[in-house]
């Protein structure tokens, strides 16, 4: 478990506690969303949908920093998934149909051109030196300053969510769930 005690943006709601760690350059940030005791990861994730994440982010941007005791497990995870079925279900089944796909304008071929499969692989590693996600590595963390009598405690020793966010646009570049922080 990695531990820190620092001034960080902090927001809480009925379903979760949230904080943000800025990366070097302040262009991207690592957001931590810890569901409240008794609240499942699914409910916390649902609270981020629609305008939920944007509202939490706005509150973090406009509020003062809070003393936060943050405990995060080291993380090293990979995911590889085929997207043929999800993309077909989202409305593009013809692209995968060898008899009916319409990609002949893209290349000359004596055979029909179609998409066989779409594979997606992500990897993320978080440790004391920073975060590696895909081909991007960012190392340093910085935060603002304020004083608070009692620090807030966010200790991720149960399932939690994280996101890597482009701070200029507010877009989530990665969103993940850690179901078992002990592994």
Image (spheres, helix red, strand yellow):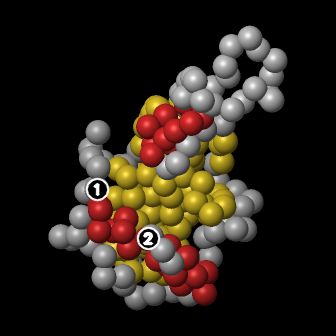
Classify mark 1: residues with Cα within 10 Å, few (<14), some (14-19) or many (20+): some
Farthest residue to the front: give it.
100
Answer above or below: position of 23 versus 108. below
x and y percent of residue 134 in the render? 60, 38
Residue at 51%, 42% in the rendered image: 87
Is residue 7 among what the camera can see?
Answer: no
Q: Residue 3: name its quadrant.
A: bottom left
Answer above or below: position of 48 versus 116. below
x and y percent of residue 56 in the render? 50, 78
Residue at 31%, 76% in the rendered image: 15
Mark number displayed over residue 159? 1
Per the image, label 1 sits on a secondary structure element best described as loop
Whether residue 161 sits left or right of residue 179 in the image: it is right
Task: Looking at the picture, tell me which residue is in the foreground, 150 or 125.
Answer: 125
Whether residue 69 sits left or right of residue 144 in the image: it is left
Q: Mark 2 points at which residue?
A: 48
Whether residue 59 sits left or right of residue 24 in the image: it is left
Residue at 51%, 63% in the rendered image: 31
């Amino acid at each position: 478990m990695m531990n820190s005690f620092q001034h960080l943006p902090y927001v809480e709601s009925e379903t979760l506690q949230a904080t943000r760690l800025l990366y070097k350059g302040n262009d991207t940030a690592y957001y931590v969303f810890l569901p409240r005791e008794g609240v499942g990861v699914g409910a916390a994730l649902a609270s981020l949908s629609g305008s939920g994440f944007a509202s939490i982010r706005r509150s973090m941007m406009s509020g003062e920093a809070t003393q936060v005791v943050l405990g995060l497990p080291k993380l090293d995870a990979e995911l590889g998934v085929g997207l043929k079925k999800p993309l077909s279900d989202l409305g593009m089944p013809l692209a995968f149909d060898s008899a009916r796909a319409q990609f002949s304008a893209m290349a000359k071929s004596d055979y029909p051109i179609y998409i066989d499969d779409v594979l997606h692989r992500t990897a993320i590693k978080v440790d004391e030196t920073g975060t590696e996600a895909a081909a991007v590595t960012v190392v340093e963390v910085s935060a603002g300053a304020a004083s608070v009598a009692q620090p807030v405690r966010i200790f991720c020793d149960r399932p939690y969510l994280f996101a890597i966010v482009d701070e200029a646009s507010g877009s989530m570049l990665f969103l993940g769930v850690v179901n078992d922080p002990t592994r």
